[in-house]
Image (cartoon, grey):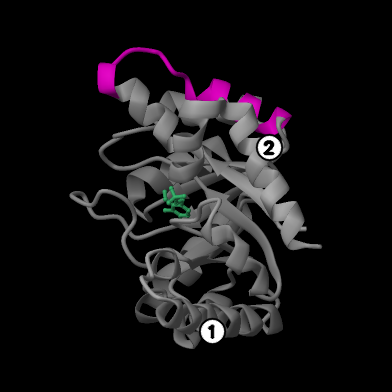
Amino acid sequence: MIRLAVNIDHVATVREARGGIEPDPVHAAVLAELAGAAGIVCHLREDRRHVNDRDVRVLRDVVTTKLDLEMAATQEIIDIALDVVPDLVTIVPEKRAELTTEGGLDVASNLHFHTDLASVMHNKGIQVSFFIDPTPVQVEAAARCGADIIELHTGTFAHSRSRIEREAELTRLRLAAELAAEAGMVVTAGHGLDLRNLAHIGSIPHLEEVSIGHALVSRAVFVGFERAVREYVEALASLAT
Ligand code: PXP
């Protein structure tokens, strides 16, 4: 069964709208775990627009499943990761003005940098995932750098406007997943997934986990956090049958 990792960034986005203490993303993490999430994801951005340093540290103490710190590979955030020691880091590209992560990481053009980064994290016992577009070049580069996991960017799939576009992107995702599994890496996916488009991702081979944030938090506004998480867990379970 494909596991669900819950990204809690947007609980913090609501908190930051008023600059107070509610809603607390740590509270959301606990509810997500109680409702069946296999992991908690948060993205500590350079501008701290949603989760902040305190959140990451408290999450490290509270999360009992798996804490995935999504991060750009800047020295400031690398130092925080090495100090907090999440179970895993997911390396993403980050642009200051973007609304959310746009496009995958270019591992292939920066092999030495990403190899060194993976090795620094591994020395601390932190697993390394690269968030990449589903192309053979990036999958092979991730393997060469020593990544444990690749997270395939599903944004293009999620935003496809026709069945033809969607099938073309699913074909790229399937091929990338095959190559990654052959290279010995764990395959995960994320970005733009929701209760509707989730039905198609069961066709991606070797997919072990999905990371879902915006749509799940949006659903939680109407039905509550635990119920929203359960709906996603159930949707993933139904893919297996
Ligand atoms: N995976 C990565 C690497 C991301 O950057 C994001 C967005 O923060 C997600 C998954 C979750 O995407 P969404 O919020 O669209 O579900």
The spot of residue 179 in percent (x, y) is 62, 85
Q: Circles 2 and 1: CB distance less than 8 Å? A: no
As helix, strand or loop, the secondary structure at mark 2 comes to helix
Q: Which residues are magenta?
A: 17-34
Marks 2/1: CA distance? 29 Å
Name the residue type under label 1: Thr
Q: Main secondary structure of the magenta part?
A: helix
Residue reaching furthest to the front: 163
The quadrant the N terminus occupies is: bottom right
* Residue bearing mark 1: 171
Q: Residue at x 51, y 52 (%)?
A: 194
Look at the image and say whether residue 24 sits in the magenta stretch: yes
Residue 10: x, y in percent? 40, 35
Residue at the spot x=32%, y=51% of the render? Answer: 100
Magenta stretch containing residue 54, yes or no? no
Q: Residues within 10 Å of mark 1 (few under 14, many from 20)?
A: some
Q: Tell me the quadrant of the picture where the C terminus can be found.
A: bottom right
Circle 2 Cα neighbour tier, 10 Å, few/some/many (<14 / 14–19 / ≥20): some
For the view shown, which residue lies furthest in the left direction? 97
Label 2 sits on residue: 230
Element type where label 1 sits in the image: helix
Q: Quadrant of residue 28?
A: top right
